[in-house]
Image (spheres, grey):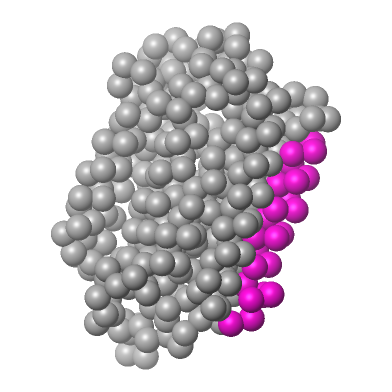
C-alpha cells in the first residue's frame, strides 16, 4: 500500500472535528470580549490537527505492535504486515514535529507559558496513547477527552488571543467565558468518546479492551450520554444569563441545537444495529464542531467590539 492511502486509512478524520470545535469555542470566548485574533486562532487549529494526527497514528502503532486486535478487526493488519505498519510510527513522529513547530510559533506570539502547556500535552498524549497501558484503553478514557479538548484546548486558545491585548490575561472578566465553555466542550467530547466506545462494544469485548462501555455496560453509557447532554446545555444557558450577554435567546441557540442532535443520537443508540453505529460517532464529533462554530459566529456578532492589535496587509 502506498503512503497516501496509508495516511487516509489511519488519520481518523472524524475525530479532528472535536479538536477544531474546541479551538473555535475558545475563539468564541475571545470574541465575546472583543479579542478575536485570526492568525493565532488559525495556528491553534493547525496545532490541534497535527497533535491529533500524531496521537491517532501512534494509537494505531501501539495496537499493531502489541497485537491488541483493533487493527486486525479493521483489516488493517493484513494490509500493513509486509511494509506498512512501521510507517505508522514515522507518521506519528512527523506530525508531532509539525505540532511542535506550530507550538513554538504560538509561544513566540504569546509567551513562555505556551511551552508549559505543550509539555503537559506531550505527557498527557503519551499517557493516553502509549506507555504500558494507554488511558484510552481503560475506563478513564473519557476523562482524557474532557481535559484535553475541554479546559486545555478551550482556555489556552482563548488566552492566546487575549494575550495580544493590553489587558491583564488573568483578569476574571476575560477568563470566565472560557471556563464555562471549556466544561461545555469537555462534556461534549466525553459524549463523543462514549459514543465511539459504544459503537465498538462487541469488538472491544472480543479483544478484552476495558473501555468505559465494556466496564459499566451499554445502559449506563446511554444514561451518561444523555446526562452529559442535559448538563452542558444547562451550563451554556447559565453562562449566557450570568454573564449578562446581549440577545440571550440567540446566544443559547447553539446549546439547544446540539442538545436536540444529542437526543437524536441517544434514541438511535437503542434502536440501530451495531454495524450502523459508526455513523452516530461522526454525528457526535460533528456536534462538537457545530457548537464551536455557531458559538464563534454568534459571539462575534453579539460580543464586544473587536479591538484586535494585529493587522494584515496594512489594513
Q: Residue furthest right?
A: 271
- Residue 248 magenta-highlighted: yes
Q: Measured along the vertical axis of the image, is residue 214 above or below residue 168?
A: above
Q: Is residue 241 left or right of residue 20?
A: right
Q: Measured along the vertical axis of the image, is residue 142 above or below residue 30?
A: above
Residue at image point 42% right, 72% down? 30
Q: Quadrant of the C terminus?
A: bottom left
Residue 165 falls in image quadrant: bottom left
Of the pair 212 and 91, the residue shown nearer to us: 212
Q: Residue furthest bottom?
A: 315
Residue 297 visible in image: no
Residue 191 visible in image: yes
- Residue 250 magenta-highlighted: yes
Q: Measured along the vertical axis of the image, is residue 113 above or below residue 74?
A: below
Report the predominant secondary structure element of the magenta stretch.
helix
**Whole-percent x, y for residue 145 in the image:** 46, 40
Of the pair 127 and 238, the residue shown nearer to us: 238
Instruction: Give, as a single range, the part of the protein colored magenta.
Output: 246-268
Of the pair 175 and 258, the residue shown nearer to us: 175
Q: Is residue 312 left or right of residue 230?
A: left
Residue 134 falls in image quadrant: top left
**Whole-percent x, y for residue 197 in the image:** 59, 27
Residue at image point 68% right, 67% down? 253
Amino acid at each position: 500500500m502506498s503512503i497516501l492511502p496509508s495516511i487516509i486509512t489511519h488519520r481518523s478524520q472524524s475525530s479532528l472535528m472535536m479538536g477544531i470545535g474546541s479551538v473555535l469555542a475558545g475563539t468564541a470566548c475571545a470574541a465575546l470580549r472583543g479579542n478575536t485574533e485570526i492568525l493565532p486562532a488559525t495556528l491553534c487549529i493547525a496545532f490541534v490537527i497535527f497533535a491529533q494526527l500524531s496521537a491517532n497514528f501512534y494509537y494505531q502503532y501501539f495496537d499493531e505492535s502489541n497485537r491488541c486486535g483493533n487493527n486486525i478487526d479493521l483489516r488493517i493488519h493484513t494490509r500493513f504486515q509486509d511494509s506498512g505498519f512501521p510507517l505508522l510510527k514515522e507518521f506519528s513522529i512527523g506530525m508531532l514535529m509539525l505540532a511542535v513547530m506550530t507550538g513554538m510559533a504560538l509561544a513566540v506570539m504569546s509567551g513562555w507559558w505556551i511551552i508549559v502547556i505543550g509539555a503537559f500535552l506531550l505527557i498527557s498524549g503519551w499517557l493516553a496513547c502509549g506507555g504500558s497501558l494507554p488511558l484510552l484503553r481503560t475506563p478513564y478514557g473519557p476523562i482524557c477527552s474532557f481535559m484535553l479538548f475541554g479546559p486545555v484546548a478551550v482556555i489556552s486558545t482563548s488566552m492566546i488571543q487575549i494575550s495580544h491585548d493590553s489587558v491583564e490575561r488573568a483578569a476574571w472578566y476575560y477568563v470566565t467565558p472560557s471556563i464555562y465553555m471549556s466544561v461545555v466542550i469537555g462534556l461534549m467530547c466525553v459524549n463523543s468518546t462514549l459514543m465511539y466506545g459504544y459503537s465498538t462494544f462487541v469488538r472491544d469485548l472480543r479483544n478484552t479492551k476495558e473501555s468505559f462501555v465494556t466496564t459499566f455496560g451499554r445502559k449506563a453509557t446511554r444514561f451518561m450520554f444523555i446526562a452529559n447532554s442535559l448538563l452542558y446545555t444547562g451550563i451554556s444557558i447559565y453562562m449566557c444569563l450570568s454573564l449578562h450577554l446581549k440577545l440571550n435567546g440567540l446566544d443559547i441557540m447553539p446549546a439547544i441545537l446540539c442538545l436536540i442532535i444529542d437526543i437524536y443520537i441517544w434514541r438511535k443508540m437503542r434502536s440501530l444495529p451495531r454495524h450502523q453505529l459508526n455513523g452516530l460517532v461522526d454525528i457526535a464529533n460533528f456536534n462538537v464542531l457545530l457548537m464551536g462554530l455557531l458559538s464563534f459566529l454568534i459571539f462575534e456578532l453579539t460580543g464586544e467590539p473587536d479591538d484586535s492589535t494585529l493587522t494584515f496587509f496594512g489594513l
